[in-house]
Image (tube, coloured by chain):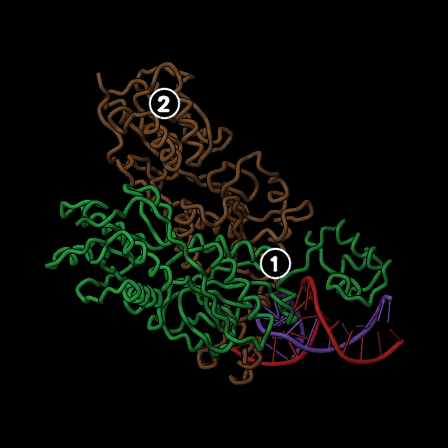
Chain colours: A green, B brown, C purple, D red
Amino acid sequence: MATNIRDVAKAAGVSVATVSKVLNGYTTVNQQTKEKVLRIVKETRFTPNSAARSLVGRRSMTIGMFLTTGLAHPFFAHILSGMEQSLKSMGYDLIYLTQIQWDKDYSFVRHCQSRNVEGVVVFGFQHDDMDFSELIDSGIPTLFIDLDVKEQRTGYISSDNETGVQEALRYLNGLNHRRIAFLSAIETSYVSRHRLQGYQAGLAEAGLSFDDSLVVASDFTKEGGYRAMKQLLARPTRPTAVICCSDTGALGAYQAIRDAGLSVPEDISVIGFDDIEIASEIQPALTTVRQDTNTIGRKAIELLDALITDVSMQPPEAIVPTQLVIRGSCSVAKG
Amino acid sequence: MATNIRDVAKAAGVSVATVSKVLNGYTTVNQQTKEKVLRIVKETRFTPNSAARSLVGRRSMTIGMFLTTGLAHPFFAHILSGMEQSLKSMGYDLIYLTQIQWDKDYSFVRHCQSRNVEGVVVFGFQHDDMDFSELIDSGIPTLFIDLDVKEQRTGYISSDNETGVQEALRYLNGLNHRRIAFLSAIETSYVSRHRLQGYQAGLAEAGLSFDDSLVVASDFTKEGGYRAMKQLLARPTRPTAVICCSDTGALGAYQAIRDAGLSVPEDISVIGFDDIEIASEIQPALTTVRQDTNTIGRKAIELLDALITDVSMQPPEAIVPTQLVIRGSCSVAKG
DNA sequence: TTGTACGCGTTATCAA
DNA sequence: TTGATAACGCGTACAA
């Protein structure tokens, strides 16, 4: 049934070595025999067995994926789509390494090694989530998304979180907002930290001073956004606008604002971050900082491939521009 | 660096064969040597190389995935999450086979064979989309989601589309609706056909007659739903309610209804299908037939595993119950 | 330019 | 109960 290299060799009347050479693009093979072999390969629909290939030390053409969030994260699905493109064009297959069992003895690294994975994409982790040293020490090329790890054979990619938030703030400032709050997410996370920095930079640029009471942390969920916004509204002086660390958080903020008898954008302007599908469907449509998920995914694989191919490559760090998408959740500040 | 079975054997003072037997649960090995080997395995953090394993004809513990829709489909992401659970507990890894190049010579089946994939999940296809005969002939166990293929070593899973729509119709009928339209999607698709059947069954149950002019086809997108709803509204007699084949289609229907100067649910009640995130966030929140994506995904893998394990298994077909989620997009029919 | 033969890491057979 | 050893399918020195 499954034809192997020996069948091809026999049919072509050559040795297996010759077939192998033809298949691997060696130039040291006669044009005629080459054509003959190629013809037989086509006829017999032969495809080299990848297990055998990677066993002899050849490339396995597989990239592993490691997530905390699970596959269903609405944001990550889009990054995956972007990855798909470069994966396809470079000939990699993507393997989703399910954590067999998350006990002390389970090692993600060994899992990768046993699968002969050439490189790994890691997403959804914070620095204190786990110890990446085993992964780094293993020498498996790794590309982190939204986490600034720069070690041997390691790199990362993320959106330009600072500029994204800074632009959002600039926009609000242009709308005469002066009391602009910031709904942070998990404070220790890479993106939260950088988005906060963008907030501060934007404040400085607008000549506004930083006010502790206008910043409150939560997480990336709708519920977290709801709680945070509620806290914010309970404080003596209300903001006229709020920038959220995520669209899901903004969803919660909407709810909290409504529950307080206020409305968006008349009483409070809201800006999100991500631009997930829902953003354009809710009422009012959410003004948000769009992440270029497609580019993030595509480039992540390109960088990882570079890391795999070039052993001495310097740790790459890529920052992908964001874009402020203006919709209906902001209005000119009153008064 | 990477330790292999010989290293372990040497360290344990036994032969590689013994180590292999211990690792594969053979009972024909002395308790003491077994413990010794196990200890060394733990110390040395040895994990068998899966490429070598599958090369000798052992199980590869990999399941392939084949999609048209791309990874980003909001609905499929949730199915994946469900799959993740059983994948994990059964020890499979999931490999996403990117279509290296979609030309005539590319064969998904050969790709699977070269990767030693034990089984395949197929999603997003219709019967006329492609020729599945190569896949079926290959003997690779295959589980189709939302497509009724029942061949050798093949099976499928889908929601109970008929009952789902029928319940929706029953609900609308209880709200005094008599002119209930059906926004179909791609007519040839398995789910569209069955949802249409549910519509007809519901009509019969309610004692209503089928009216051609109340059914219009499009696709699963928002734009498709928009166009279809527009067509529907252009016809002489307007429906008082509409059941959509998908939530995204319902989104488009909302838009078309608004553009016509009408409103949901006052003028027209709308019911969707799927229950994607957006459904609960839009205004008015969408009443919809929820698919149990988690169960679909989980069970898909369970069935596939059964198909893999039991060579003579009859083609399984699984129908997963849906649930009508009542929100704000339906009201009692006027008059 | 082509072919022989070995090795990759593992499992399975069979002899000890 | 254990251990040699032959596969599995392929790539690649090295020899011819």
Q: Is residue A312 left or right of residue B274?
A: right
x and y percentages locating residue B314 in the rendered image? 51, 41
User: Pointer 1: what residue?
Assistant: A91
Q: Nearer the viewer, residue A91 or B88?
A: A91
Q: In this rendered view, identify the residue nearer to me: B118 or A143.
A: A143
Taking the spot 24% from the left edge, 21% from the top edge, the residue there is B333
Picture layout, residue B85 above or below residue A263: below
Q: Left or right? Give the position of A65 relative to B112.
A: left
Relative side of A51 to A176, left or right = right
Q: Quadrant of residue D11?
A: bottom right
Q: Please, what is the three-letter code of the amino acid marked with disc 2? A: Ala
Task: Give the CA separation, mark 1 to mark 2.
Answer: 47 Å
Residue at screen point 53% across, 80% down: B8
How dense is the environment of label 2, judged by Cα within 10 Å: few (below 14), some, or many (20 and up)? many
Say yes or no: labels 1 and 2 on the same chain. no
Near mark 1 (Cα within 10 A), the count class, few <14, some 14-19 or many ≥20, is some
Could you tell me which chain the residue with mark 2 belongs to?
B
Helix, strand or loop under label 1: loop
Instruction: Tell me residue B6's x, y (percent).
Output: 58, 79
Q: Amino acid at mark 1?
A: Gly
Residue carrying label 2: B181
Tell me the chain of label 1.
Answer: A
Task: Inspect this view and state whether residue B86 appears.
Answer: no
Q: Which quadrant of the figure contains the N terminus of chain B? A: bottom right
Please provide percent x and percent y for residue B24.
51, 68
> In the figure, B11 relative to B23: above or below?
below
Task: Identify the residue at horizontal 31%, vertical 15% (top origin).
Answer: B207
* x 29%, y 36%: residue: B286
Residue pushed farthest left? A236
Residue B260 found in image quarter = top left
Between A249 and A90, the one lying in front of the other is A249
Kindly state the secondary structure of the residue where label 2 is placed: strand
